[in-house]
């Protein structure tokens, strides 16, 4: 199975039957599995446990990246206290109330969501100069209307002052994203916020709370890292949350500190539509593809509405280092092929470590499948035996474990480190 000549014939037979289609999107040269049509807009609510986490930057760039996939997107700014989306997109703010927007929306006057300089993307900016004490019933009515907007995807910037709306108003057909930095205080605030969600589940579902929380549709976005080694704290936090609260909160992406983000704010343009490709641009593209390829998102429903249950921020319930992986994973974007007993398939390698790699593929695999990963893009075309360790259906992501250690895994890590050290193009 590891012979290069033998596998070329297999690849030819496989490509004749079910070729892996590649789609180039925008200027990043990224590819993804074809996106299936959805019924009704996908609602993505972006929030944070406390202000300053970067949720507004995530909202505008994620929305722009999804629009780059060809989806019709509307961004809705519901941050009453500090609306920023109009500034980030370089459009005028609106002096109108939520009630006025709701009335006009019900009259089918959808011009309240004008176009932005980003193709396929419109914006419903938040009104300025409003009384911040907007009744919850009004916000719920607005959220309900989002499902009828003329869009395929609606991305909502949820204000930190009304963060409980993530649970109150986005229970059905919504993908909830939480943004946090890696500082201990930020992680503690995020955990307390999620613990409040778990308490709501216990109040609503009793003994079935864990089963209900297992249907939670969303993810975690880590912000403000300076090196790949720092990503692991978010993955460790995700595992801690799942073990102690029963909430599946996979890490959807990690963003680096970057002067280019500050420059994009000054230029009033999303980062991803500006010239140059860096790790953050790749991360936003990866987030967009991951969320839009989550076929089960609209079927999962975890309603957590009800009276707010305030949990004070405090120390995490366990040492987060206990949940960290032994080997650092380094993000990459490599084309490769996976050779299995059943054939050969093209894959995308998204990260590597000394113990294994993560790949994205449209081919259905099973835990325990064995094969050989051929790194065709690297010099010398190294190959390494692997076994499938885990599957993440939401993103077509597969975790591979190297069955042989030695020079080749070390070489892959060295190549990933070198790529991470190169300046943005």
Image (cartoon, rainbow, N blue to C red):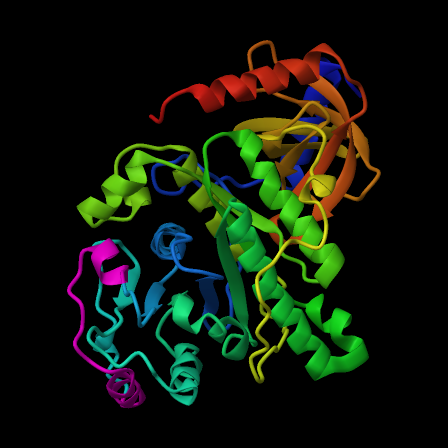
Q: Nearer the viewer, residue 288 or 336?
A: 288
Q: Residue at x 84, y 38 (%)?
A: 368
| Above or below, comparing residue 8 to residue 320 in the picture | above
* Visible residue check, residue 217: no
Q: Position of residue 198 (x, y in %)?
A: 67, 70
- Residue 98 picture quarter: bottom left
Front-lying residue, 89 or 194: 194
Q: Is residue 98 above or below residue 154?
A: below
Left or right: residue 100 versus residue 414 is left
Magenta span has 94? yes
Q: Quadrant of residue 308?
A: bottom right
Query: Quarter of the image holding residue 386?
Result: top right
Q: Position of residue 369 (x, y in %)?
A: 82, 36
Residue shown at 38% from the left, 87% from the top:
135
Q: Residue at x 64, y 51 (%)?
A: 238
For the C terminus, the quadrant is: top left
Give the vertical position of 318 relative to 36 (above or below): above
For the point 62% across and 18% down, the residue is 412
User: Horizontal and vertical percent for residue 70?
Assistant: 38, 54
For the question of whether residue 365 can be seen, the reply is yes
- Indicate the quadrant containing the N terminus: top left, top right, bottom left or bottom right: top right
Query: How many numbered discs, if any?
Result: 0
The residue segment tinted magenta is 84-107
Residue 179 x/y as whole percent? 48, 54
Magenta run includes residue 62: no
């Amino acid at each position: 199975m590891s012979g290069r000549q033998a596998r070329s014939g297999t690849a030819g037979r496989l490509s004749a039957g079910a070729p892996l289609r590649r789609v180039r999107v925008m200027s990043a040269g990224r590819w993804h599995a074809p996106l299936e049509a959805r019924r009704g807009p996908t609602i993505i609510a972006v929030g944070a446990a406390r202000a300053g986490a970067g949720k507004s930057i995530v909202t505008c760039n994620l929305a722009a990246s999804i629009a780059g996939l060809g989806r019709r997107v509307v961004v809705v700014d519901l941050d009453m206290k500090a609306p920023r989306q109009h500034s980030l997109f370089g459009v005028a703010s609106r002096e109108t109330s939520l009630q006025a927007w709701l009335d006009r929306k019900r009259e089918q006057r959808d011009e309240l969501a004008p176009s932005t300089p980003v193709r396929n993307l419109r914006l419903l900016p938040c009104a300025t100069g409003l009384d911040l004490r907007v009744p919850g019933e009004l916000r719920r009515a607005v959220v309900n209307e989002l499902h009828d907007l003329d869009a395929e995807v609606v991305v909502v910037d949820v204000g930190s002052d009304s963060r409980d709306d993530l649970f109150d108003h986005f229970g059905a057909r919504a993908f909830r994203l939480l943004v946090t930095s890696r500082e201990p205080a930020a992680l503690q605030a995020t955990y307390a916020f999620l613990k409040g969600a778990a308490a709501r589940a216990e109040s609503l579902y009793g003994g079935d709370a864990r089963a209900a929380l297992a249907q939670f549709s969303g993810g975690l976005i880590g912000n403000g890292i300076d090196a790949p080694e720092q990503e692991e704290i978010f993955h460790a936090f995700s595992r801690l949350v799942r073990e102690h609260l029963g909430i599946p909160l996979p890490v959807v992406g990690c963003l680096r500190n970057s002067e280019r983000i500050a420059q994009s704010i000054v230029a009033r343009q999303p980062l991803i539509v500006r010239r140059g490709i860096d790790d953050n641009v790749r991360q936003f593209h990866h987030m967009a593809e991951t969320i839009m390829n989550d076929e089960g998102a609209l079927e999962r429903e975890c309603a957590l509405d009800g009276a707010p249950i305030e949990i004070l921020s405090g120390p995490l319930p366990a040492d987060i280092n206990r949940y960290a992986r032994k080997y650092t994973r380094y993000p990459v974007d490599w084309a490769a092929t996976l050779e299995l007993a059943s054939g050969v398939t093209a894959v995308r390698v998204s990260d590597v470590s000394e113990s294994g790699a993560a790949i994205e593929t449209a081919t259905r695999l099973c835990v325990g499948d064995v094969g050989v990963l051929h790194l065709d893009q690297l010099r010398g075309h190294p190959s390494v035996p692997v076994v499938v360790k885990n599957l993440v259906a939401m993103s077509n992501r597969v975790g591979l474990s190297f069955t042989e250690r030695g020079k080749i895994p070390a070489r892959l890590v060295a190549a990933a480190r070198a790529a991470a050290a190169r300046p943005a193009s």
